[in-house]
Image (cartoon, helix red, strand yellow):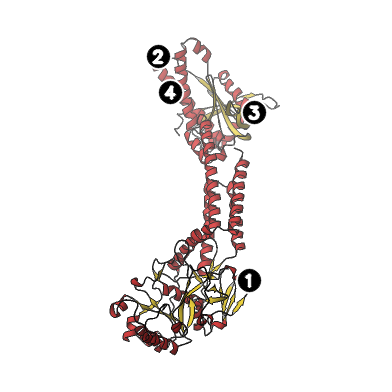
Amino acid sequence: MNPFSKIKAITVFGVVSTGCFLVLNLWAPQFVEERVESLLIDFRFQLRNLIAPPAVPQNIIIVEIDEKSLEKYGRWPWSRVRQAKLIDGIVRAKPSVLAIDIFYPERESRKADAALAKTLAKARGTIILAAGFDTTATTPVEPPDFLLDNALVNIKDQSRLSQAPVVNKPKTSIAALSSQALLGHVYSPADLDGKLRWEYLYIKYADDIYPSLSLVTAAQALGKTIADITVYAGRGVQVGDTYIPVEPAGRMRIDYLGRDRTLRYISAADILSGAFQPSDLKDKVVFLGTSAISTYDFVVTPFSARMPGVEKNATVVENILNKRFLKNAPLSVVSFVVLVTGLILSFLLPQMRAMHGLILSLALMGVFAAGNQYLFAYRGYYANFFYPFANMTLISVFSAGYKYLTEERKAKELKKMFSHYVSPKIVEELLKNPDLAKLGGYRREITVLFSDVRGFTTFSEKRKPEEVVTHLNEYLQEMTDIIFKWDGTLDKFVGDEIMAFWGAPLEQPNHAELAVKCALNMSDRLEELQAKWRAEGKEPLDNGIGLNTGDVLVGNIGSADKKMDYTIMGDHVNLGARIETLTRKYDSRVLISEFTYAKIEHLVQEGKFYRVDMKEIDTVKVKGKDIPVKVFGIHSTHTAPKK
């Protein structure tokens, strides 16, 4: 396959994939945002707390109506007289603010309601009651006067309020109680998977905007009133010098500190019995709410499947007081990351080997994931993780798959092509490095070997064809095994002639040395075969071997749709064949050219070549050359060593 085709295919796929994810990032489906990305943010919460969990605040306390309280004072709901006593006990400890996450939607009795109203009135200005709303009502209901007193008055950019939640019917505590305290809504819809990840700091009701219980509580803790809260619709909420970033719907992502009961709890039973230290509540932000299983006031969070709803509200206050806000990274930043990472992989992966490409992909994904987690844990930004990571994964998988399919096909072609030419060891090397097999044609210095059986025509004419073929095949098999043993490439058989070469398809700097040692090994093995054949009563075969070294043309030659041969061509090939014919004239089994001799001369002189005798035999006139080429006879003075 044309390398450019591979580069083009992967690059085009990568660019198209990157473009698609850029579009998705700008027009994100709700499913991706609320299901996939939310789960990834949940994981970032878990990872952050595993590495460096946030400190637990000491200025926020939850007084819980728990199992212990119900066991001691009876099942919930308690009489309002007892609740008045509980609230009075908390107020006497002088907290900075008390948020009561309990509804009183119906009258109990004149005496009980009056007792609780009196207690609330004593601490008016520091107590906030939860206010609910009926989200199913379709017809607007006129708001009661006590609710109007809690509406926000400083609203900027009112045209941006269109995405804020709209409710039509309040579900507040009775007027006798609601009129004695500040009010804050507890509208908290969960995401599609049932987890509560957001706090709606304000909602629309009738013609007004109402703050949440947590927002009013935080404002009171900061020494501010409802009148001091400024809403920049769709962008943020200002409380004193604290600016709370929000999304267009007026919601802030809650930065949960951990599992349920991460914040400090005190049992209501201990308040009622006086078994607590008032200093535990003094100047603290106190929430009063239920945690007993039978009260069913629980929410699902990224950390917990059952967190008391009161702790969720308290966590929001902690976020505001400590300015622990999670901000959504701008779309432009995420788009930039998608674009840059996508283009890097699209243009680099096609030019890299599969393993190097895998390393690049994993490194880029790792850097992105680490950077994303750093921004989340230490800078309070949550940037979309899914789109950049999914794009990188898709491009990497396509690149790897495409390369695997094309390279596997190429490997099969190489194996089929070269298994008849070279040893299994060289085939394996080519499969590991397919680019080493340059099939298109190139020039390279190689050493070529020609071997021919002497007197084969006469030999074959005297014997039956079956006998000739069997005898010749035995000889050719032995010689081929030796060529492969010395890492040679078997070019072809032409009758009884063998043509082999060294230096291609793999580069072999010592190609001449390997070829000469192979020739001597072939000569020695032939002498052993001759002795064997004589013992078997067969006529022994003899051969001549000629070698030459020089630059030749190497490539896959033939008909592309019929038959191709990996072979060599050139004057130095012809010279090698000519030298082989001289072995008969000089009765020397192995002859080499001066070019081959020059490659091994230093090895012989330095004693690094096993013992051989070499002598100049003749000169050969080469076509197109004025100066004849010297030819040397060479033979080993003892059996050639085994490789």
Q: Are marks 2 and 4 in contact (CB under 8 Å)?
A: no
Q: Amino acid at mark 2?
A: Gly
Q: Are marks 1 and 3 in contact (CB under 8 Å)?
A: no
- Separation of residues labelled 1 and 3 (CA atoms): 84 Å
Q: Amino acid at mark 1?
A: Ser
The numbered dot on residue 570 is: 3
Q: Amino acid at mark 3?
A: Gly
Q: Which quarter of the rendered picture does the N terminus lie within?
A: top right
Residue identifier under label 2: 537
Q: Amino acid at mark 4?
A: Glu
Residue 78 in the image, given as x and y percentages of width and height: 34, 80
- Separation of residues labelled 2 and 3 (CA atoms): 42 Å
Residue in the image at 28% along x and 80% along y: 72
- Separation of residues labelled 2 and 1 (CA atoms): 111 Å
Residue identifier under label 4: 528
Residue 49 in the image, given as x and y percentages of width and height: 44, 68
Kindly state the secondary structure of the residue where label 1 is placed.
helix
Kindly state the secondary structure of the residue where label 3 is placed.
loop
